[in-house]
Amino acid sequence: MGARNVEKSEQEWREQLTPAQYEVLRRAGTEPPFTGEYTYNKDSGEYRCAACGARLFGSDTKFDSGTGWPSFTEPAVAEAVELRPDNSLLMRRTEVICRNCGGHLGHVFDDGPGPGGQRYCINSAALNFQPAQAAGAGSATSAEPAAADTARGAGTPADGVAGRDAGPAGAPPA
Ligand code: FE
């Protein structure tokens, strides 16, 4: 409900995203397990939102959950994601959303290995991996540079865009 820093019409999202990305990010779909391009990725770098470019997860918190989806113990920046109850499909789950654009990322469960005990189960299709060394050099990985494109097109007051990258890595809201 709250205003997003990045707001686009469904038509705009459809044009920007691949069908697989659209299905996950805008329709809360789930990619089939063991099919996503980042499931087994162990390279160091950061995972950004495939829709808006917001920094979401770091490779240092990624672990092999055996579930077939990229799994993380925590977000790179607590404020980057939003959690909300999801009782669809006769399950009680907690949905993980990109706070910046409202895109669906996946779900978080309480059976993770870290001190926080959480397992962020995230669709590869919702992510865009930026290798540590090539960060900014625009190499290898899929798709177009959604980040730069979106930041420019956001058309919101300056603080919206600045908040995304410049915020201190704050503590979770108690
Ligand atoms: Fe996003």
Image (tube, rainbow, N blue to C red):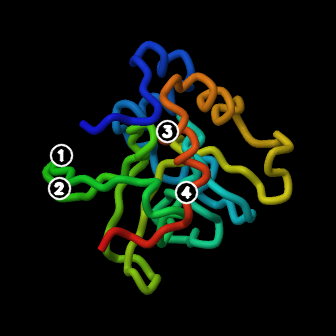
In the rendered structure, the answer to whether residue 130 lies left or right of residue 155 reads right
Position of the N terminus by quadrant? top left
Which label was assigned to residue 160? 3
Q: Are marks 2 and 1 in contact (CB under 8 Å)?
A: yes
Q: Are marks 3 and 1 in contact (CB under 8 Å)?
A: no
Q: Secondary structure at mark 2?
A: loop
Instruction: Estimate the spatial distance between the alpha carbons at disc 3 and disc 4, rounded to whole Å.
Output: 11 Å
Dot 3 or dot 1: first in sequence order is 1
Q: Amino acid at mark 2?
A: Met
Dot 2 or dot 3: first in sequence order is 2
Q: Position of residue 104 (x, y in %)?
A: 39, 42
In the rendered structure, the answer to whether residue 15 lies left or right of residue 173 reads right
Label 4: few (<14), some (14–19) or many (≥20) C-alpha neighbours in 10 Å: few
Of residues 79 and 11, the one drawn nearer to the viewer in this rendering: 79
Identify the residue at horizontal 43%, vertical 13% (top origin): 11
Which label was assigned to residue 88? 1
Query: Quick check: is the Cβ at mark 3 less than 8 Å away from ligand 1?
Result: no
Q: Amino acid at mark 1?
A: Ser
Instruction: Estimate the spatial distance between the alpha carbons at disc 2 and disc 1, rounded to whole Å.
Output: 6 Å
Which label was assigned to residue 167? 4
Q: Is residue 18 above or below residue 40?
A: above
List the residue tagged with mark 2: 91
Q: Secondary structure at mark 3?
A: helix
Quadrant hosting residue 54: top right
